[in-house]
Amino acid sequence: MANLELEQALWQQGFQNIAGVDEAGRGPLAGPVIAAAVIFPKDCMIDGVNDSKQLSAKQRDLLFDRIHAQALAVGVGRVDHTEIDRINILQATMLAMKYALEQLPAPPDYVLVDGNYFTHKGYQFKTIVEGDAKSFTIAAASIIAKVTRDRLMMKLDARYPEYGFAKHKGYGTQQHLDALKQYGLCEIHRRTFTRKFLNEP
């Protein structure tokens, strides 16, 4: 269960506004990658906040509202499929995280980032592998990013109903792969991700 140990160590060092950052949507074949940055008041804790992958959709929806209600600030960044194809998914993820941090009303004192890679000249930061399972603040960001992206993909499902985006959110499920073979690519597919499924060069 995510806890405040990392944040408490930073508070003791004098840092005040600690942002947790995480993303959703690195692996899908379609849609954007979404990142979120969240800052909480000191010692704030919300029961149930954990790695978004360990929670049900209903739990995430409830926590999404609680996080927004109790956080000092929430920022969301989005990088669409065309940019993912242009610069690759790693760089697109870094860009989404940068956008999320820029959406905060004031720069954080310190940034905790899920994963093993991040770069930004403007912030002191630490990367944490499986940070969404270890840091409460990163876990909260993972929930914001996941719910934001899932809701977007459900809206896109209405535009492209034949692909089943509301169900699989753009990931490479069998249903999605079968739809790709039948209908080909739609506007929001990541070309660099889907070529191997369509035998394209």
Image (spheres, rainbow, N blue to C red):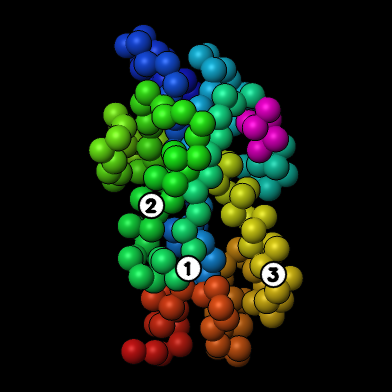
Of marks 1 and 3, the one in the foreground: 1
Report the front residue among 198 and 79.
79
Q: Residue at x 39, y 71 (%)?
A: 85
Q: Which residue is mark 3?
A: 157
- The magenta span reads 63-69
> Who's the residue at 39% across and 89% down the image?
200
- Between disc 1 and disc 3, whose residue precedes? 1
Give the residue number, with chain letter if any, for mark 1. Answer: 81
Count every numbered label the image shows and give the total. 3
Does residue 172 show up magenta in the picture?
no
Disc 2 is placed on an element classified as helix
Residue 95 circle label: 2
Residue 65: image quadrant is: top right
Q: What residue is shown at x 59% (from left), y 31% (from top)?
A: 49
What is the distance, in whole Å, between disc 1 and disc 2 at their CAs? 13 Å
Q: Is residue 136 above or below residue 62?
A: above
Q: Nearer the viewer, residue 186 or 73?
A: 73
Label 1: how many Cα within 10 Å (few below 14, some 14–19, many 20+)? many
Circle 3 SS class: helix
Asked if the stretch drawn in magenta spans residue 64, the answer is yes
Q: Residue at x 44, y 40 (%)?
A: 102
- Mark-to-mark CA distance, 1 and 3: 16 Å
Position of residue 57 in the picture relative to residue 85 (left or right): right
Asked if residue 136 is positioned above or below residue 181 in the image, the reply reads above
